[in-house]
Structures are given as C-alpha cells and as structure tokens.
Amino acid sequence: MREMTEFLGREYEEMEKQGLTWVIKSLNGPSEPHVEVEGKKCLMLASNNYLDLANHPKLKEAAIKAIEKYGAGAGSDWSIAGTMDVHVE
C-alpha cells in the first residue's frame, strides 16, 4: 500500500508541475447569470441557474415553506423510506 501511496504522490506532483490539477474557486455571492470570482465579474456558463430562477423570490419562499414542513432532506433513498407526498405531487 505504501508503494501505491508514494506512486500516486509522485504522479500528483508531476500533474501540479504541468498545471493539470483542478483548483476549486468559490463564488463571492449567490450563483447567478453573472457572478464574482476572485474579485472579477464573470458570465457564469457552468451553472444550472442560467435563468436565475434559484434566486426568484417566489421560488425562495416555496423552498422555505418546504423546509419548514419537510426538513432539509428526505432522510433516505426514495425506494426505502424517502418518498414524500411532495415528491408524488
């Protein structure tokens, strides 16, 4: 196992030298069509929120009501015990 760990470490170092590693960048606010990343305004082309519906007041209100009624998650896979009436709707 140690040999594998050392091998992977060397491979990762080589990838870093070549600039092939993935650097996660965080948004400085909500995911919208235009976002700020590292202080720069950018057009967001990698989001499912290109229509900005996730920030629509009515959708946010509905999400708050659903959380108040159902909590923050189903608590299980749908096939075991996670299907709720709201999923069936």
Image (cartoon, rainbow, N blue to C red):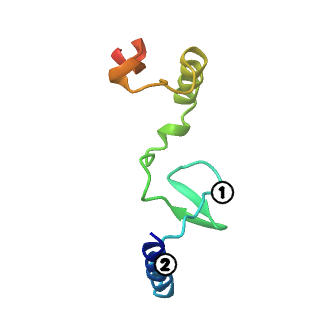
Provide the residue designation for mark 1: 28
Determine the residue located farthest toward the top in the rendered image. 85
What SS does tag 1 mark?
loop
Q: Relative to residue 54, is residue 68 drawn left or right? A: right
Please give the name of the residue rendered at 54% of the width and 26% of the height, measured from the top-left corner: 63
Q: Earlier in the sequence, mark 2 or mark 1?
A: 2
Which amino acid, by three-letter code, is at mark 1?
A: Asn
Q: Nearer the viewer, residue 72 or 16?
A: 16
**Marks 2 and 1, how far apart at CA:** 36 Å
Residue 20 placement (x, y as % from top left): 44, 79
- Classed neighbour count for the residue bearing mark 1: other residues with Cα under 10 Å, few (<14), some (14–19), many (≥20): few
Please give the name of the residue rendered at 50% of the width and 52% of the height, measured from the top-left corner: 33
Which amino acid, by three-letter code, is at mark 2?
A: Glu
- Classed neighbour count for the residue bearing mark 2: other residues with Cα under 10 Å, few (<14), some (14–19), many (≥20): few
Please give the name of the residue rendered at 44% of the width and 75% of the height, measured from the top-left corner: 8
What SS does tag 2 mark?
helix
Q: Nearer the viewer, residue 74 or 33?
A: 74
As drawn, 43 above or below 73: below
On-image quarter of the C terminus: top left
Q: Nearer the viewer, residue 11 or 23?
A: 11
Provide the residue designation for mark 2: 6
Please give the name of the residue rendered at 44% of the width and 44% of the height, measured from the top-left corner: 51
Residue 16 placement (x, y as % from top left): 50, 82
Give the mark toward the camera: 2 or 1.
Answer: 2
As drawn, 24 above or below 69: below
